[in-house]
């Protein structure tokens, strides 16, 4: 049955946990072009030229909101179905919008998480003399947040010369061309 699929395999949290996680994000007004999205993290990612620490503080590498929105769509589908009254065809008809919302949100989640992880790996490997495998191994065992991992790397790993360089390109201050 459709309802057992929702209940047993993909629904991993109860409504209170989902709503407490979604309360951190800004609700969206209805948009007919992106009707499946209900919340946004409202973060504008900084460019690659921003420092790694600033990008971490800004939330460029934080988790995506789409997972929690997808869980909410499953909770809503579960609430709409009554197993004693509805057969399989009725369940599909009642939950069609919620299941379509879930599918689209999980697609968005997979794309967004992949992009954020790739950007994080690229930022750490360009800032510190580390390989991607070292980052993956250390982060899997890391118990703190990403900022504490950055501070650990800054203290114990070598920074690349370009990340240490603070001056700007061009003529140094105070050296103006004087006409004779």
Image (spheres, grey):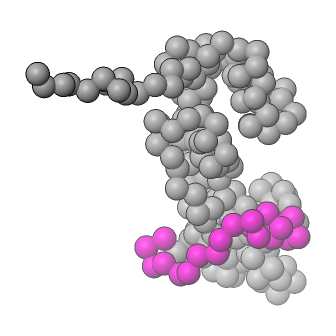
Say which residue appears at 65% left-offset and 41% top-offset. Answer: 56
Say which residue appears at 60% left-offset and 46% top-offset. Answer: 60
Q: Percent position (x, y) of residue 14?
A: 88, 66
Seen from this angle, which residue lies furthest left? Answer: 180
Horizontal placement of 167 versus 100: left or right? left
Q: Out of 62 and 161, give the one closest to the viewer.
A: 161
Q: Is residue 17 visible?
A: yes
As for residue 23 lying within the magenta part, the answer is yes
As for residue 25 lying within the magenta part, the answer is yes
Which portion, as a residue range, is magenta?
A: 15-34
Q: Percent position (x, y) of residue 79?
A: 81, 79
Say which residue appears at 59% left-offset and 42% top-offset. Answer: 55
Note whether 29 is above or below 34 in the view shown.
Answer: below
Note whether 133 is above or below 74 in the view shown.
Answer: above
Quarter of the image with the N terminus in it? bottom right
Horizontal placement of 44 versus 71: left or right? left
Horizontal placement of 107 versus 86: left or right? left
Q: Out of 80 and 160, give the one closest to the viewer.
A: 160
Seen from this angle, which residue lies furthest front? Answer: 180
Horizontal placement of 45 versus 74: left or right? left
Query: Image quadrant of residue 7?
Result: bottom right
Say which residue appears at 68% left-offset and 49% top-offset. Answer: 63
Seen from this angle, which residue lies furthest bottom? Answer: 85
Q: Percent position (x, y) of residue 91?
A: 71, 77
Note whether 46 is above or below 106 in the view shown.
Answer: above
């Amino acid at each position: 049955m459709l309802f057992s699929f929702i209940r047993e395999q993909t629904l991993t949290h109860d409504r209170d946990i989902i709503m407490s996680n979604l309360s951190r994000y800004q609700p969206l007004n209805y948009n007919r072009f992106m009707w499946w999205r209900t919340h946004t993290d409202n973060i504008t990612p900084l460019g690659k030229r921003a420092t790694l620490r600033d990008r971490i503080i800004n939330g460029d590498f934080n988790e995506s909101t789409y997972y929690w929105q997808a869980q909410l769509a499953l909770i809503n589908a579960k609430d709409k179905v009554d197993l004693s009254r509805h057969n399989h065809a009725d369940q599909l008809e009642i939950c069609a919008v919620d299941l379509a919302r879930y599918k689209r949100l999980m697609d968005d989640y997979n794309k967004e998480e992949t992009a954020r992880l790739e950007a994080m790996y690229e930022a750490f490997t360009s800032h510190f003399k580390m390989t991607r495998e070292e980052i993956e191994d250390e982060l899997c065992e890391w118990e703190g947040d990403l900022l504490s991992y950055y501070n650990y790397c800054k203290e114990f790993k070598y920074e690349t010369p370009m990340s240490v360089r603070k001056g700007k390109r061009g003529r140094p201050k105070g050296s103006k061309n004087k006409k004779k």
